[in-house]
Amino acid sequence: MTNMPLPAADMTAPVPVVLAGARGHGRWHLANVRRLQHQGRVRLAGICELEPLTADELIASGFQAGESPEQSDDFAALLDGTGARAAIVCTPIQTHTELALTAAARGVHLLLEKPPAAAWADYARMSEGVERAGTACQVGFQSFGSHALPAIRELMNTGAIGTVTGVGAAGAWVRDEAYFRRAPWAGRRRLGTTDVVDGVLTNPLAHAVATALELACRGRSEEVASIETELFRAHAIEADDTSSVRVTTAGGLPVTVAVTLCAERAGEPYVIVHGERGRITFWYKQDRVLVQRAGHGPEETVHGRTDLLENLLDHLEHGTPLLVPPAATGAFMRVVEAVRNAPEPAPLPAPAWETRHEGPGGGARRVVPGIDSLVAAGAESLRLFSELGAPWARASEGAAS
């Protein structure tokens, strides 16, 4: 979808919003809608869930006793019945395209959680559908709202670190085995014949991939020349939980991302912009930037962030450009497609991982010893796991243009 300003709308009344998917990560969206409702910007008109939220769940989300928005498991009927002008879709990955098109067909603007789709064809169909309908679509890569991004681009464009030589990203997260049992689609590449592609690169640490590509090539699909993938799994799942990918842009810039859900210790994910005379490190969840360059001491700054739903509302009211239109996620979706078409993730041999029981509940999780250092080395050197000498890694098998 093109990021063209929409005609100014009458925003004197709060915008009626429907939330599809109010549990799990949807609770964050529910709280955010409630925040903006208190400001008079939106009105929560409806919640779409297979099972309605209970009174206790609503109260825990900030509702008053007896206060309840309309609830239904029929998204289309809920949009029609509430007169919604905007919708938030925070549902399983494989449902995103059809729900987005359902909203677009009714002229309802959209905040669509990442990843926008499980396959390139679905992404293209969704993008074309919302553009044809003339509705706004914002994809939920929250890091794109960070005010650090334009600050980093300015540093890159003015040569603060010299010619950019590559972009790396690293993410070392901890997830226990229960994480992969939280929903029928969790940790799956497909359900029957339906693509899901719930791997570490495409969902839990998708922000690392998308943010690196945003800095390297503004996230445009046409800027992707080739993709190399190395997908592994320590857990007994279909999808990958420990992977590296290298995207080469049309200009020859390497973008390497190394991530895991089997870290020894949980760390803050980050992106590094490498230059001939320095580097810029961006901890995107913290909006924190560290500039290290020749002839200067280290400079660290913390930036503000624009909420994506607020940006969507500003787009509807004032024509403010969207921060994450579908086109800005095209390069990321090329990676999703490469992962989807790659060979099945290789199971790590038993000596490469161990089970630990940690936390208050003593939940079991699988840890790959040494992976934290490997992930960091991937972002540092722009090399894949096999090139770093990981004993369990084999040379990448899949390349996509």
Image: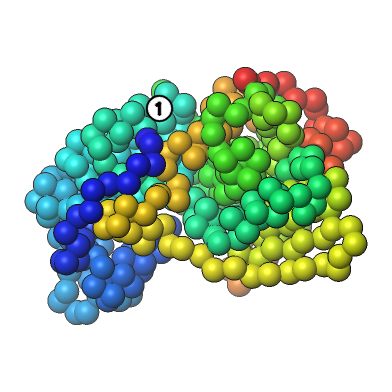
Q: Extreme bottom residue here?
A: 65
> Callout 1: helix, strand or loop?
helix
Q: Quarter holding the C terminus?
A: top right
Q: Position of residue 151 (x, y in %)?
A: 63, 59
The answer to whether any part of residue 11 appears in the image is: yes
73, 284: nearer the viewer: 284
**How has the structure been colored for display?**
rainbow
User: Is 31 positioned to the left or the right of 388 in the image?
Assistant: left
- How many numbered markers are drawn? 1
**Residue marked by disc 1:** 124
The answer to whether any part of residue 19 appears in the image is: no
Q: Position of residue 26 (x, y in %)?
A: 38, 58
Quick one: label 1, few (<14), some, or many (20+) residues within 10 Å?
some
Q: Residue at x 79, y 42 (%)?
A: 163
Q: Residue at x 86, y 50 (%)?
A: 277
Circle 1: residue type? Ala
- Residue 116 picture quarter: top left
Q: Quarter holding the N terminus?
A: top left
Q: Position of residue 390 (x, y in %)?
A: 85, 38
- Residue 65 picture quarter: bottom left
89, 233: nearer the viewer: 89
- Residue 14 picture quarter: bottom left
Q: Extreme front residue here?
A: 158
Q: Residue at x 19, y 42 (%)?
A: 107
User: Is 287 positioned to the left or the right of 160 in the image?
Assistant: left
Q: Is residue 28 above or below residue 382?
A: below
Q: Residue at x 64, y 70 (%)?
A: 302
